[in-house]
Amino acid sequence: MAAINRQLVLRARRDGVPHADDFAVQEAPVPEPGEGQFVVRNLYASLDPALRQRLTLTDSYVPRIELGEVLTATTVGVVVASRDADYPAGQHVVGHHGIADYWLTRAGPVTRAVDPAAVDSLSHYLSVCGPTGLTAYFGITRIACPRPGETVLVSAAAGAVGSVAGQIAKLAGCRVIGIAGGPEKVRRLAEDYGFDAGIDYRGQDLAGLTAAIRSAAPEGVDAVFENVGGIQLDAAIDCVNERGRIAVCGLISQYNATEPPPPLTNLFKLVARSICMEGFIVRNYSAQYGAAAACLAQWARDGKIRFREDIHDGLEAGPEAFLSLFSGANQGKVMLRLDPAA
């Protein structure tokens, strides 16, 4: 085991869009496990939009990252030293760990052992079988609850979560409409992911986006998988049918806002049409991760779900890779490969 542990840390915080120099790579000793602990050699680390909330907010569902602290995310790695008999050296694990070469941890509700043979690449435990796939799975199957013949609308539909959410809705027998940014991503919705229709939100105001959704869904929308917020959510609410369901996964349009966003104009329609809108986080379903991941892996092996991985090599690539989530430059699930041999 190496003597140096390289870590990605927060060095500055700011309102608005973060800068690459807000982060730094620092060296520390490799930790030693105490009783009931084990050390993970991280192979891949996930980069997700939700991390942005933890850089500034104090009321997120996980603690704010303070200056000088190591950024944390879902990682997949291998145990290299252990004082926990259930997690011996050589065991592969997925958990919420530091974005670092090595991380000291212990067993917990969101740390689980995984089988490398169950997937084509360990990176899949961060994409289709990891946070993105699991978020899509639970948001669609537990909250949106689409029924055959219904129409489902997905925002940020070409992204890592939205693309899988739409495909799961298709597997449920639904007509699926996606909202994405730019003609290339809209094209990808139909050609790569099997969506029935795509809408380009760029250049659209609220009235134009509402009209585009109504044109694509003339009989209305029965369920929404919401990733963006802002006028996209406002327009979607206006088009949801009576007793529709809205699963709120994220509001990425607001993560870098420096002023409060404009208020939604259609909220009373939730009352008038008996619409259920529910926010969720994937860890609400942590007890069901294993079964859901196995289902997603089988769908992927059978070619029923397609997905992209946007892999960047090394800790130094972390800041720019993270910022790509907010510029739209990413092309799939963004992650870092921390071990070149992985």
Image (cartoon, helix red, strand yellow):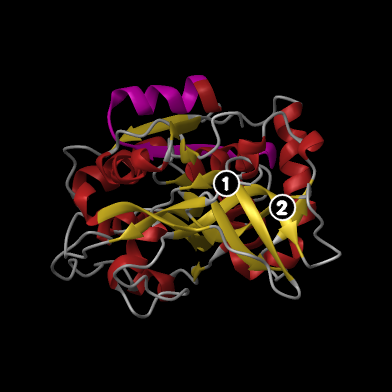
Circle 2 packing at 10 Å, graded few (<14), some (14-19), many (20+), is many
For the residue pair 302 and 169, the one nearer the viewer reads as: 302
The percent position of residue 139, horizontal first and vertical second, equals 58, 57
Q: Position of residue 217 (x, y in %)?
A: 43, 40
Give the image location of residue 81, x and y in percent. 72, 57
Question: From what the image shows, is residue 29 above or below residue 269?
Answer: above
Residue 211 visible within the image: yes
Check residue 208 in the rendering and tell me which mark sits there, or answer none. Answer: none
Sequence-earlier tag: 2 or 1: 1
Instruction: Determine the residue positioned at 37% across, 67% down.
Output: 69
Q: Is residue 116 above or below residue 60?
A: above
- Residue 129 vs residue 127: left or right? right
Residue 222 visible: no
Up/down of 163 relative to 144, above or below: above
In the image, is residue 177 part of the stretch drawn in magenta? Answer: yes
Q: How many marks?
A: 2
Q: Secondary structure at mark 1?
A: loop
Residue under the image location 57 percent in, 40 percent down: 164
Foreground mark, 2 or 1, reads 1
Please name whichever residue, 167 or 43, is drawn nearer the observer in this view of the structure: 43
Disc 1 crowd rating (10 Å Cα; few below 14, some 14-19, many 20+) is few
What residue would you read off at disc 1? Answer: 2
Q: Amino acid at mark 1?
A: Ala
Which residue is rendered at x = 80% and y = 67% of the image?
Answer: 84
Q: Which residues are magenta?
A: 171-191
Cα separation, mark 2 vs mark 1, equals 14 Å
Q: Is residue 147 left or right of residue 99?
A: right
Amino acid type for the residue under numbered disc 2: Val
Q: Is residue 78 magenta?
A: no
**Viewer-proximal residue among 16 and 233:** 16
Q: Residue 266: give x, y in percent of width and height.
A: 30, 66
Residue underneath mark 2: 79
